[in-house]
Structure formats: C-alpha cells, structure tokens
Image (cartoon, helix red, strand yellow):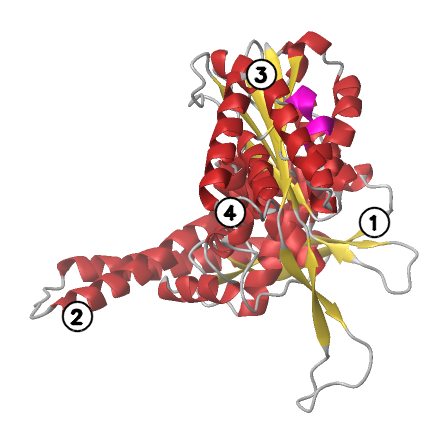
Amino acid sequence: MHGGAVNDAGHERLRAIEAEIAAVQEAVAIAMVTPMVFRQAVDLQALERERGALCGRLADLLAAQSLQGALLGEAMRSAEDELIRSVPKKYQSEGWREVTLRFAQGHRITVVARYFRQKARRRRRGGYPGLLLLGIHDRCTPTLAAEVSRLATALGSFDEAQQELRGRGIELDRKTVRQLTRHLASRARVAQQAQETPLGQRLCGRRVVVSCDGGRMRIRRRKRGRHTAKGRARYRGDWQEPKLLMIYVVDPAGRLEKDFTPWIDGTLCGPKAVFGLIAAYLRRLGVTEADRVLFVADGAHWIWLRIAALVRALGLRPEQVEQLIDFYHAVQHLGEIVRHCTHWTEAMRRGWLKDQRRNLLKGQLGRVLDAIDSVCRARHAPELSRERRYFLRNRARMGYARLSEQHWPIGSGAMESAMRRVVNLRLKGNGIFWNRETAEEMLMLRSYYKAGHWDTLTTLAFTPALAA
C-alpha cells in the first residue's frame, strides 16, 4: 500500500469497520427485543457477560472508525510530516500499511496508517508517527495501556493483573502486561525529565514539609556459571535500598491541606538521584514562594549531608527553612541507650526513658545531653558512644517544643506510611526478586498511583513530543 493507494486502501478499511459496526448494531437490536427467562443468578450473570461483550465490541469498533477517519485526514498528515521533520534522524515514507491495534475493551482491530522508515541504514527502523501522536504505543491504545499499567501497579503482581483483565474479557499474556507497564513508566520518566513545566499546583504562601527515607527490597542479579538442572539461569537476591521522597503541605493548625495532593516519587539510583528529584519537584512547584519549608527525616547521614546544598541550589532564604530529626527516631535512639545499660533494672530503664522523652518534647535538650553524658561516662561501651554522637550531631535539629507550638509535624509518620504503601506492599516480600529496571519503573508507577497523581503520569507517558 504505497503513495496514492491511500484513498482506496484507507477508505476500504473504513468501510469494512463500518460494516462490522452495522452488524454489531443489528445484534444489539435483536438482543433488545429478545425475551429472556431467568431462573437463577447464573442466568443473569451469563446475560450480563454476553451483553457486555457485545457493547464492548461496539465501543471498540466506534473508536476504530474515528481513529481511521482521523488517520486519513489532511490535518493528521500535516502533523505527521511536522513530527518527522522535527526528528534529528532522517525518515522517509514507505506508504500506507495495515496495522492491528488492541482497543480499550481488548478487541484487535486493523486500521491503515502511514509508515516511515529511517534512511541510509542496512537494518532500518520505522514506525507510525500518526499513531504515536495519538499516544498509541506497543500496538495498544492509551486507555487500555493505562488500565493495564494501573492494575499491574495497584495489585500484588503482574499475574493478578492478568487475571483481573481476563475477568473483564481482555486476554493478555503476562509478558504483554509487563511490557505495557514497563514501557508506560519509562516514557513517563523520560518526559518528566525533559519537561520543566509547572505541576499544576503551587506552594505560594504555604507551609511545606519535605521528607525522604530509604526502604528495602531484593534485586535479582544473575550468577555466572552453569544453569540449573531445569535449564534456568542461577541468580542471587541482593538487598537494595530504594530512596523515596514526599512533599506535602500543612495548614496553620498542622493538618494536611486537602486541596494540595502530596507528591511521592522514588529511585534506586542512590542519594544524589533522589535529591535531584526533590530539587526538580520543588522548583516546578515554586518552592521559593512558600511561607516556610520543613525538612524532616531520620538521622541518616546521606540525607542531612545534602540538605544545605539543596537549600542553596533552590535559592531558599535561611529564615524560610527548618530542619528536624524525626522525634520518634530520636526516642528510638534513647531506647538504644537504656538497652545497653544492663546493670539497670527494668523500672530504671522505663523511668529514665520517660524522663528524657519528656525533656525532648519540652525543648530541654541540655538536660537530655547531660543525662546521656552521665550514662556514657559510667559505661564506655562503643554503642553508647555512638548514640551520644548521634544526639550531639543532630542537636540543632531537635527543636521539638518550638515547632510543636507552631503546629508543625515533629515526626515523619507520613513518610513511613508512604514507604509502606509504595514499597513494602508491592515491591518487598518473601520470595520477591526484581530486575533492577523493572523495579525502578514500578517504583515510579506505585508512587504516583498512591499519591493520587495517576492521571499526571499517564499524561506524561502519552506526551506527543516523546514520540520524536
């Protein structure tokens, strides 16, 4: 199908689709006047499945009809040519070809589209720019690709997503489910990194809380050597720490503002990468216009060593910024101190811990440090010295009384909850080992899904400019 054959081939395909639509409409009309007798629930269930499949087929055919009409229009041809000219590599038209697509209800329907191939290459690659402009990747429409990815993200595994789709009458193998999900995530990440547009929300005049933390999951790494008796490659499951970030807003009473949807994202590429994400999100949200910004996290060195550089890079004023060690992590370290005081009774441990916890909350950090010094002077265990250094190093980040009076959160409970929902309930578990690339992509998908920004992610994934 080349050149001028478009009118014949394209309109012939359009007429074929219209004929299928007429046939399905006739079947619907017959179903409307056919009397049914129900004796039990299974009869009604069977009818609903039958009618649902009929209407689903009609919906996909109607979408295919509109799609084919758009591909034949002059506006689409102009948009395709403009896209091809914007690509650095040179492409040439190979005419019109038939391509079978899978639509929202899972039906495979053939349309005719213009095909372009790279010039001056022995093994030349090609594609359908018109389909790419409409967000059609992997021979799958955006609605179906987004729904498949959403199910794979929300449910416990790719197999569960496949079963859910099968229950809806959409037959996809596990490999296709995984491929659609991974490709959507990778396109969204590329588009996210390429764009500097605002995120649709602003931090102007708001009280902003920024937090980050690390979790745990297993990454599958292939071993060298012979395969197993069943011919499978051997591998080991190394622990990896995914880094997660969270940005949210609290009102003057310290409650989460409902008109601002929090942002969650993560990466497996280490501290530098996650702080790059934090900087990108805060810039696009206009953090310099915020009233104040609180950085709250546990005492991990990789976090606090980078905060000062992040503040400078963002152009935040010193009076805008607060830093706070999560109160409950600080209390946990107090618990480690009394745990190593083996000569104390249980009542003495509880009493000392209660007193120092109260002192922390009241802002009497000097008393806490004096109490820690007295314990460490009496017992020279390395563990006690380490805990003492923890409080000395972070004493400037323990203003719990002052920030509590101003109704700021003094803990990172929101971050801990995000880590559980994003990582622990999907990426971590007994017998779960991820390929690194798949885990990185699922981390982004899960973060956006749990934060309530799924529509934003799919918009990024189907950005037309990405096709170039």
Query: Tag on residue 420?
Result: 4
Q: Amino acid at mark 3?
A: Leu
- Counting residues from the N terminus, which is met first, the one under dot 2 or under dot 3? 2
The correct choice, above or below, for 223 with respect to 462 in the image is below
Q: Amino acid at mark 4?
A: Arg
* Disc 2 to disc 1, C-alpha distance: 56 Å
Q: Could you say whether the residue bearing mark 3 is in a helix, strand or loop?
A: loop
* Disc 1 to disc 4, C-alpha distance: 47 Å
The correct choice, above or below, for 280 with respect to 53 in the image is above
* Residue 264 occupies quadrant: top right
Query: Tag on residue 203?
Result: 3
- Counting residues from the N terminus, which is met first, the one under dot 2 or under dot 1? 2
User: Which residues are drawn in magenta?
Assistant: 391-397
Residue designated by label 2: 42
* Disc 3 to disc 1, C-alpha distance: 44 Å
Residue 285, image x, y percentages? 62, 21
Residue designated by label 1: 91
Is the residue marked by circle 3 packed among few (<14), some (14-19), or many (20+) residues within 10 Å?
Answer: many
